[in-house]
């Protein structure tokens, strides 16, 4: 265990000193399988990525970019890490194996129950709660970690388990109820949104969250169809969208609309924004942040937030000179994100859009010195 931790620490030191890796693969094969997916349907369209029985059950807990996450967080024996997207427990297990204590949460009761049972052997080293990662300050306080943690991992998106389970309503590969709730105890479903939301709001959702150019035409078709009866299944909605948007290539025409509905039903971008703001106060000085995103909307939010809070100086054309950034809280160990390597992509196409970004929390002393030195230049 100590030898393994030492190797990880050595590799991570080079990262924290500013060495960069290209955003086109790591140059070494990674024998890991993805837990998260890009969108709810892009990978499941046409049934190409359907469940494979025992293999899918085995892959439930294996997470994308697991080696890279360990390298970024560089945990030591006794460090405390918050896993805000527990899922099947893949990242948490790797952290526990490295000697860290893990406080985790997940909004999906089914995933939470699975991970708790699977990681029960770690005893008090592992604690898991039902909740969303934007509640991290409350969850950490309840766990007795009021002074912050040494690391935070957020693996955004949905799991392969969500995609493959037709009953959850995330995919159109198999017909199922139009649900899409990550938290099965929540009230809002995709069925309610599709049938009860007004036309203007549906257009906004499909355009902003799905970047669907045909949003107006799709919404018109939905409004017309629901005059004759409620749209209740993924198959109904997918067929309706396909009647408006012709199929071209391998991507199903409903892909972007399903992504948009999933994001809206689960308020994914709202939770992410609130969580990003809380990382500043939930990380100890020197604490490390690792965030894996799967689509451009998430990645842009993460990239902008980290850039905004890692600039030592701010400058605007109307200012006579640059000013110290009072919200410079992070240093960025790598300018470009890490992405899965060749082996991982060959074995799991669902990992193809994953991007890992990282940051290190500055302390008050190092923050002041950083600002002073930068300003002097």
Image (cartoon, rainbow, N blue to C red):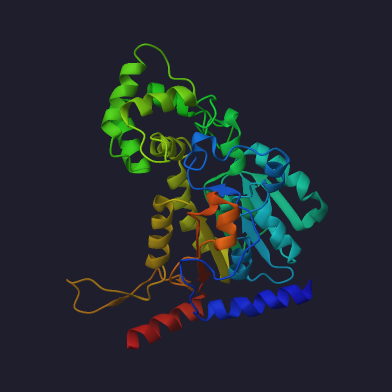
Q: Position of residue 345 (x, y in %)?
A: 55, 56
Q: Position of residue 368 (x, y in %)?
A: 44, 80
Number of disc labels: 0
Instruction: Quadrant for the N terminus, please.
Output: bottom right
**Closest to the observer: 146 or 99?**
99
Instruction: Residue 150: tell me if it is visible.
Output: no
- 198 lies above or below 16: above
Residue depicted at x 41% and y 62%: 303
**For residue 176, which quarter of the picture?**
top right
**Closest to the observer: 127 or 225?**
225
Side of 297 relative to 66 (left or right):
left
Residue depicted at x 32% and y 20%: 223
Residue depicted at x 73% and y 40%: 54
**Closest to the observer: 211 or 109?**
211
Residue depicted at x 72% and y 57%: 93
Side of 253 relative to 142 (left or right):
left
Q: Residue furthest front?
A: 249
- 320 lies above or below 248: below
**Closest to the observer: 186 or 281?**
186
Q: Position of residue 331 (x, y in %)?
A: 47, 74
**For residue 371, which quarter of the picture?**
bottom left
Side of 332 relative to 243 (left or right):
right
- 29 lies above or below 12: above
């Amino acid at each position: 265990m100590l030898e393994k931790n030492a190797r990880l620490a050595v590799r991570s030191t080079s990262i924290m000193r500013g060495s960069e890796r290209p955003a086109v693969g790591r140059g070494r094969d990674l024998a890991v399988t993805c837990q998260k997916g890009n969108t709810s349907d892009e990978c499941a369209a046409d049934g190409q990525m359907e469940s494979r029985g025992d293999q899918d059950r085995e892959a439930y807990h294996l997470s994308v970019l697991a080696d890279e996450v360990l390298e970024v967080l560089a945990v030591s024996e006794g460090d405390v890490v918050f896993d805000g997207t527990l899922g099947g427990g893949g990242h948490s297990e790797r952290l526990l194996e490295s000697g860290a204590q893990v406080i985790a949460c997940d909004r999906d009761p089914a995933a939470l129950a699975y991970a708790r049972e699977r990681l029960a052997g770690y005893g008090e080293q592992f604690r898991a709660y039902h909740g969303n990662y934007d509640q991290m300050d409350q969850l950490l306080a309840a766990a007795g970690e009021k002074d912050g943690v040494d690391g935070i991992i957020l693996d955004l998106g949905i799991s392969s388990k969500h995609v493959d389970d037709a009953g959850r309503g995330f995919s159109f590969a198999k017909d199922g109820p139009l649900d899409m709730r990550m938290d099965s105890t929540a009230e809002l479903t995709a069925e309610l949104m599709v049938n009860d939301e007004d036309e203007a709001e549906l257009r906004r959702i499909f355009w902003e969250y799905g970047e669907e150019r045909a949003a107006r035409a799709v919404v018109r078709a939905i409004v017309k169809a629901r005059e004759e009866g409620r749209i209740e299944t993924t198959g109904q909605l997918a067929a309706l969208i396909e009647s408006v948007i012709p199929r071209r290539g391998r991507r199903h025409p409903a892909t972007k609309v399903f992504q948009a509905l999933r994001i809206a039903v689960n308020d994914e971008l709202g939770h992410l924004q609130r969580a990003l703001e809380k990382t500043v106060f939930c990380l100890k000085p020197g604490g490390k942040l690792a965030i894996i995103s799967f689509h451009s909307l998430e990645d842009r939010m993460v990239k902008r937030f980290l850039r905004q809070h890692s600039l030592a100086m701010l400058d605007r054309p109307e200012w006579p000179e640059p000013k110290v950034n009072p919200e410079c809280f992070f240093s960025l160990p790598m300018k470009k994100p890490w992405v899965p390597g060749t082996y991982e992509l060959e074995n799991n196409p669902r990992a193809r859009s994953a991007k890992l970004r990282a940051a290190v929390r500055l302390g008050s002393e190092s923050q002041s010195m950083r600002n002073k030195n930068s300003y002097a230049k």
